[in-house]
Amino acid sequence: MKQFSSHVENMEREEPNEDVKKTSKTEVFNVESAVQVKGDQNIEHTIITSAHTIDHDSWKQVGLLLVTTFNCGYILSFSNLMLVPLGWSWGLICLVVVGFFTAYANWLLAGFHIISGQRFIRYRDLMGFVFGKQMYYITWVLQFLTLLLGNMGFILLGGRALKEIDSELSDSPLRLQYFVIVTGVVFFIFAFLVPTISAMKNWIGISVIFTFAYILILLIILVRDGKSNKNRDYSIKGSQADKLFHAFGAISTIVVCNTSGLLPELQSTLRKPVVKNMRKALYLQYTVGLGIYYGVSVVGYWAYGSAVSEYLPKELSGPKWGKILLNSLVFFQTIVSQHMFIAPIHEALDTKFLKLDEDMYSMSNLKRLFVLRALLFAANTFITAAFPFMGDFVNLLGSFTLFPLTFVFPSMIYIKIKGKTARSEQKVWHWANIVVFSLMAVITTVSAVRLIVNNARMYSLFADT
């Protein structure tokens, strides 16, 4: 497989727009190439440089990747984080509304992967091209915060799964931090051996098996427990202020379970036609994928009510081997899933530090790859071990970073590119999206910070949660 990509993209006119062609004197800034270009954006060829594979994968491969990665171990916390603060009525309404808007926003963003013949393989490059250098850096910060926080959450989930296994096998289980370290080491090994998203092709089938196996076992136990649990309580607890803040936190979590903030990077791996193929992959995610993770969340809340744990396997009844098997499947599935969400950071580091004129598996590049992956996972693992608050990761992830990346920026791009030719109602729609979701980002961020402060008072550093 071709690992390094530095090639000329021919013009692919998917949804061309005359307004873009008329736009000139817009600054294009690309940190990877360290080149500033000013002038006409109507270029027919553009050189794309990346250490990772571009224009290679099928939509089915990316679609299955989305289905399996979004049904990772994170969904085991969604019953608690999404539905407990909202209850049945508002919970189901928010699931439907937020699910629709995230699907629409990603569908919209996929249409801007190519603008006037130029392909954008990174979200920050797209924002920098349309709005200038400042938005390049804002997007870079928001996206990389999303990916780093998400990776820490994955490390924590893996550690929790291993600790649950240890709890079943021992009367005095080890501290969570030991399992967090083991998880970080395993993630590092996988990232070193499977360096790119396209290289995950041979692992997707295994991930599908692990995903459907653990979800099937989980649903069987949840249904059985729900039928035997006659004292389910679905009331929303806490003061009025707590209920309000927790509700906004739950909305943030629903955003997290539906989107990733790295769509252009995923789309870069697709072969042509990239817009059409990305949208096919999104249809698969928001039908099959969404049906699974929403289903698990709803059944978990139905089975245990407001008492449902932040980590579902803690609640499960049944034989010891069943819990061990379930947590083992979750752990192995998480190894594959987490790789997609951290891949854009790997790509940025690899493109900057690897020797692009050599094969990725040359001795020189393998040494560099080892150091880059080791430093990244060592830092993430240490921070995760020090602050093991899973719910806080998820809420902050959805509020401060994913609201603008998912909802605000695509509408901003639409107005900038198609504003002169769009109908009045289309412009009103997108301006409404920008205003409403910007306000939601502020409110949910305040809610997430409040939750972090409260937990910081409750837990000490390196707490064995």
Image (cartoon, rainbow, N blue to C red):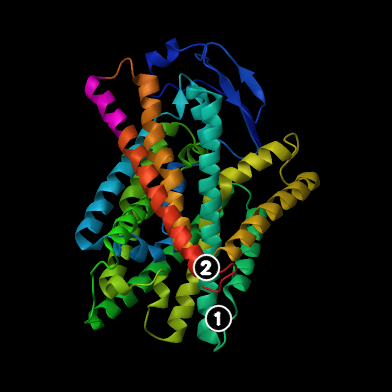
Find residue 4 and report its horizontal and vertical position in percent: 66, 37
Graded by Cα atoms within 10 Å as few (under 14), some (14 to 19) or many (20 or more), the crowding at tag 1 reads: some
Is residue 462 visible in this depiction of the protein?
yes
Give the answer, above or below, for where 36 lies relative to 170.
above
Give the answer, above or below, for where 378 lies relative to 42.
below
Q: Residue at x 57, y 83 (%)?
A: 173
The front one of 248 and 150 is 248
Give the answer, above or below, for where 154 lies relative to 458.
above
* Quarter of the rendering containing residue 412: top left
Find residue 253 and report its horizontal and vertical position in percent: 38, 55
Residue 442, which numbered label? Answer: none
Magenta span of residues: 423-433
Per the picture, the main secondary structure of the magenta-coloured stretch is helix
The front one of 327 and 7 is 327
Give the answer, above or below, for where 10 lies relative to 235.
above
**Of callouts 2 and 1, which one flags the residue occurring earlier in the amino acid sequence?**
1
Whether residue 430 is in magenta: the answer is yes
Q: Amino acid at mark 1?
A: Asp
The front one of 393 and 114 is 393
Is residue 333 visible in this depiction of the protein?
no
Residue where numbered disc 1 is placed: 166
Find residue 8 and report its horizontal and vertical position in percent: 60, 24
What whole-number distance in Å separates the C-alpha atoms at marks 2 and 1?
13 Å
Tell whether 342 sits left or right of 427: right
Q: Residue at x 22, y 24 (%)?
A: 425
* Quarter of the rendering containing residue 379: bottom right
Residue 331, which numbered label? Answer: 2
- State the SS at label 2: helix
Looking at this rendering, what residue extends furthest in the bottom direction? Answer: 171
Q: Residue at x 56, y 87 (%)?
A: 170
Tell whether 319 sits left or right of 382: left
Q: Amino acid at mark 2?
A: Phe
